[in-house]
Every structure is written in structure tokens, then in C-alpha cells.
Amino acid sequence: MRTIIAAATLLTIAQGDDAWAGCESFPGFGSAVDNVRFSIGEDTGSFNITTIDFLGSRSCHGFGDLTWGHHGTYTCGETGEVQFERQGVWIEAHTVGGLLFGKVLCPHISLKKAERAEISLGDLASKCASVTFNNCATFYDTLASNVSANELHRSSAPSCKSDPTRKANGPPLLCRGPTCQAPCKHMLPPQRPNPTDVALGSCGKQCKADADCSGCGSSGRCKGADQVTKICVDAPSSVPETPAAAATGIDWPNSWAADMFTLTYNDFSDKTKTQGGRFYYDFARGRQLQDFGKTSLLYITGAKGQPSKFYFKAFGLACFYVETTDPGTKEAIGIPRPNFMQACANMHAASYVGREKVLGEWADHYTCSVNMDNQTIAFQSWHSLGLGTDSFGLPLALSAGDSKPTWQAPRLTTTWYSNVTTGPEAVPNSMFAPPKFCVRIPGQEAETRLGLGSESFLASFGDYDVRERALKVLKDFTPAPKTQLVV
């Protein structure tokens, strides 16, 4: 029974919309995972919080020993403090250890394994311990979010008493759905609208002439040298004279994150795929994440002679990885360096394209094109001029193309970035942790096993049939259980 409960709860966390989830470890005790849902109103709404306690794990892995939850309504205060009015509280033990811990939380309730015990709000104070449990119908906590609103913090000590000076210093809860929202208005950061198919028009699409780009901004033009680089851009004839254009593209920040929207051509046809999500780049630790909500791509650079690993994660249930090394040097292939445009310029393969607009923001456009063995690999970057919402130098878009597309590299992908945040706090360690169980697929088998054909990993994640094949591969690789499930 506890296997089913734990699996069902974790599946809910992985797949739910508007859900926040996070794991917290306790010294000498174990860990707990929280699943927090808000129904958003005007600084008020409803909440539903479920907590799973893992007595034998410091990282919320394995089977939960105790599950408890509460729901009700909340009201936001001006200082960040939030008042929670409970309407129901329950607790359920799944193991003997869970029974004992349940008695620590609420010593005076009748608790049996695998049976949910509802606790009357009027009995909270008398049946549950105030030291280990907020034994009140009304409790207070402090909430805050990061700039990109994809990470929610609570306090480390919610209380039955109001305290406007309380800080939101608890472990982070991360957005586990594509539409998470901050529950209070004071937590909403000023944001630039995310790009969409409608907002982009023909920008970023392949082209042969300016006539193909009439829907790109106010001055659509076709720029590029070949099928790998030719795309539609918004290039007005009248441009700002300052700041002066740099000799090469501005380096990326060492650590940054942003909302992203991608437009991909897998091959030389006119078929495209679009996706949206969140991008995380952490060069100092050699890792990069493209999070599309229900699926994600994680790239971790190999260290000390180990190969780099390219992870495919789906729904929090399936995980596969491919080891990648340079076919020539046999060394690990790392994530792009922040100064990749400068490096290209040092090879005399980069050039300045011009001053353009990217979703209304003025930007400088640079290109890098490398030709080897009858193959062209090209990159194009756009950085902000600091004349609008985004600060000078922040990345606004990146285009990558390959004249010989494969499942790893599509023919042309353009990515737009918005709501950029920089610094170590933008790339928390928790975002880059690969699952404990992940199936390795040899690189030469990845295309066949996942049925990608000529599609890239990036473009194929939205395909239902690819996800189904991925889950089937996981089932094929998972060893049969040695014990019988007892329910």
C-alpha cells in the first residue's frame, strides 16, 4: 500500500500544474518532501499542502513512512507574511516508524497503519504537540519568490502567532508545472512578455529573400549566408548610434537563467516545432538545463577524465542518458563557454551582422560559421543594448545550425530568452540533480531506441509517441521486482 501511495504522490508532484515541490533534509533524522498547491485569487485563495516524511533517507528517496496534509484558505499581508486558515488536517502512517513519528507529531490521536486519520480543527491544540506541529487552526508563514518566479521560499519556522519580521529563509520549493504562479502580488516581479508564435510572427523562420519575412516586426529582412544561417530578423533602417557595437559578441554571464522559447527545423524541410520553458546555465560547474516542464534536457560536463552526460528526463519517472565525447580527441564535450563568440572571432570565423530588434528590444547581432569536412556549423547571438527592459549585454537570442543534422543537433534552432536573471542564486544546485535511477543508452543506439529518426532531442520532447517509446525503454531496462507487492 505504501508503495502505491508514495508513487501516486510523487507522480502528482511531477505532473501537476501550479504545483510547488521541494525536499528538505533534517540533521540526524531524515527528510521530507512538500507538495504545495495554490488556487490564486487577488492576494487570497486556497491552499493544499501534502508532506511525505522519509525517516531513513536524507534526500527524499525510497518509500515514505508518513504522509500528512492540510488545506484551507490564505490571505496575503503587505510585508510578505501570509495568514493560513485551515479547513482540514489529516495524517496517515505507512510503516511502523511512521506510526511512531505520527505519535510524536500528534501524541493523542488514534493512528493505525494505512488508515487516514482526520483531525478536527477544534482538537488540534489538545491532540497535537505545539513543539513539533503548528497545532492551531490559523497559522502564519512568510513567502517570497526569486526574480524569475520559478522558486518559492517559505520561512523555516511557521508559527501560530503573527510575526511580520519573520524571514522567508526556508529551503526552496521549485515549480513543477508549466504555469506556476506566485500566490501574492508582492511576489510578482516585473517581466518582459514571453515570446510566442504569435509575438514572433516570421522572426527566426528560414528564408530566401526579404519577401519571406514580412511578418517579422516592423522591418522584416532575410539575413544569413546559407541554409544554416538564413533567418528572418527585424532590422529597421534607422538604428540607435549608441552604445557603439563591440568588436565581438558579448560574453554570456557565467551563471544565468531565463524563460526560453525555441523554434526548430530538424531537417531541410519547412516543418517546424516550437517549445517553451526555462533555461539554466552554470559554466562554473559545467552544467546546463533546458526545462520544458514535463520533460527536460540536462547536460553535465565530465570531470577528471569522465565523459560528459546528456540526460533526458520525463515526468519525473523516466530518465535516460547518453555519454558524449569528442570523436577526435576522445575528451569530454563541455557546455558552451561564455566567450564562445570571442573564441570564434579568434579563429577569424565570426562577424558583426548588424543592429536589430529582438521582440522590441534593441540588440547587436553576431554570427560564427565554421566549415570542416564539407560540414557547416554556425551560431548566431543577439545581446541587449540596454535601451529597454534588459540590461546591456544580457543574451536575448541564440541561433544554432548544422548542415548535417542528426538526433543530437537539428538543422536550425533559434531560442529567444526573456526575464533573464544572473548570479549563483539563479542556478540552484537542486535544478541539476539527475535522478538516482537513470538508464544509460549507448550513443549509437539512442536514435533507434527512442525512434527519433532525424529529429533532435530538443525538438522531439513534445511528441507523444517519443515519450511513449521512452517509457517503454525504461520498462525494458528495469529489473523485475524480487518481492511481491502486498496491498
Image (cartoon, rainbow, N blue to C red):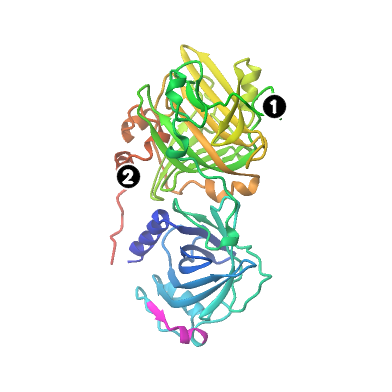
Q: Position of residue 182 (x, y in %)?
A: 53, 59
Which element carries disc 2, helix, strand or loop? helix
Q: Residue at x 33, y 35 (%)?
A: 450
Query: Any magenta on residue 122?
Result: yes
**Kind of residue at badge 1:** Glu
Q: Position of residue 367 (x, y in %)?
A: 57, 22
Q: Position of residue 284 (x, y in %)?
A: 64, 39
Point out the stretch of residues depicted in magenta: 117-125
Q: Is residue 94 left or right of residue 373?
A: left
Q: Label 2 belongs to which residue? A: 471
Which element carries disc 1, helix, strand or loop? loop
**Kind of residue at badge 2:** Leu
Could you say which is closer to the camera, residue 18 or residue 49? 18
Q: Residue at x 66, y 40 (%)?
A: 391
Q: Residue at x 59, y 75 (%)?
A: 159
Q: Residues within 10 Å of mark 1 (few under 14, many from 20)?
A: few
Q: Would residue 154 be visible to someone looking at this image?
A: yes
- Residue 114's place in the image compared with 419, above or below, is below
Could you say which is closer to the camera, residue 23 or residue 382? 382
Q: Position of residue 66 (x, y in %)?
A: 43, 70
Query: Any magenta on residue 216?
Result: no
Give the number of the disc on residue 241: 1
- Residue 153's place in the image compared with 312, above or below, is below
- Comparing marks 2 and 1, which lies closer to the viewer? 1
Name the image quarter holding the N terminus: bottom left
If you read the primary sequence from the N terminus, does the residue marked by circle 2 or circle 1 appear first? 1
Q: Would residue 172 be visible to someone looking at this image?
A: no
